[in-house]
Amino acid sequence: MAADFISLEKAHFDKAAGAFTQSHKTLKEKTAELVLSPVSGSYTAWLRAVRSLTPAPAAILDYCAGMGLHALTLQRVYPQAEVTAIDISEKALQIGAEASLSERGLRKPRFIPMDAHQLEFAEASFDLVSDFGSLSSLDFEKATAEIWRVLRPGGTFIAVETFGHNPLMNLWRRRRVQSGTRTAWCAENIVNYSKLDRLRERFADVRVEYHSLLTLGLAVLPFRAAALNAAVARVDNWMLNRLGLFRSWAFKVVVTARKAA
C-alpha cells in the first residue's frame, strides 16, 4: 500500500481525535450518542455477538481501535480478558488510554500504535478480533489476511462495517469527500457483496446481519429518543434480516466470522 495513502488516513484520524478532544466530551458520552444514533441497531448487534461467545475469550484485539471506545466496552464485557487496542493514530489511542485510567477496578487495555496491515503479533494470538468500521480505510485483502493470521483456531472475528450498495448513501459519501470529512479511499472501498464473499472464502463460517435503513430517517429529527430509536431498529431487523427485504439498501452490516478449528 502506498505510503501517501497511509499518511492521508493517519492525518484524517489524527484530525478526528483532535476535534474530539476540543469538544470536551467523554468516551462514555460518545457511547451514549451511539446508542441514540441511526446506527444503534448495528451497535446493539455487535454487542450481542460479543457477549454470546463461549468460552469467554481470554485475549481480544480491538482492530483499528481509534479512540478506544470499543476497547473499553470489550474490557467491561470480559473483565478477565487481556484486551489490546491498535491503531495508526497515536493521538486517538492516547484518548482511550487516558479514559481507561478513570475506569476504577477495570483491567486496563493495552493501547499500541501499529499499522493494521502489518500486525506485530505472532500467529494465533487472539480468541476474538473486533473491528468497528475500519476495513474501508484499509487494503481489504491485506487487512483480513492479518486478522485471520492472528486469530487462534476456532477464534472469532466480529465486524461492524458500512455497506456500499445504497445509492443515496454513496452520494452522501462523495459529498463528504468533497468537504474533507472523509478520504476518497474510504468512500471508494466500502464493504460490499463481493468483499463479503471474500470473507466466506477465508473463514470457515460467516454470518451477516443487515442494519440501519429506516433508522436513517431519524437523523432528520430535531431530537433523539431511545425508545423510538430502538423500535425502528427492531423494524429494520425484522425487514432486513427475517424477511430479507431491501438488504442492499442497508447502511450497516454486522459480520461474525469463525476461523476453522
Image (tube, rainbow, N blue to C red):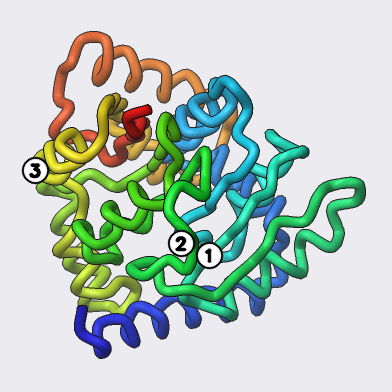
Q: Is residue 166 visible?
A: no
Q: Which numbered dot is residue 194?
A: 3
Relative to 227, does residue 202 appear above or below in the rendering?
Answer: below
- Look at the numbered discs 2 and 1 and tell me whether their residues touch, using CB distance below 8 Å: yes
> Whole-percent x and y of residue 35?
57, 38
* Residue 59 drawn at (x, y percent): 61, 44
Question: x and y percent of residue 128 in the render?
Answer: 50, 40
Q: CA distance from mark 3 to mark 2?
A: 22 Å
Q: How far from the left and from the top, in percent, is residue 56? A: 63, 27
User: In this rendering, which labeled residue sits more in front, label 1 or label 3?
Assistant: 1
Q: Residues within 10 Å of mark 1 (few under 14, many from 20)?
A: many
Q: Quadrant of the C terminus?
A: top left
What residue would you read off at disc 2? Answer: 64
Name the residue type under label 3. Answer: Ser
Whether tag 3 and tag 2 are in contact, CB under 8 A, the answer is: no
Q: Report the residue marked by disc 1.
A: 86
Q: Earlier in the sequence, mark 2 or mark 1?
A: 2
Check disc 1 and give the amino acid type: Ile
Secondary structure category for the residue under label 2: loop
Farthest residue in the right direction? 104
Answer with mark 1 or mark 3, whichever residue precedes in sequence.
Answer: 1
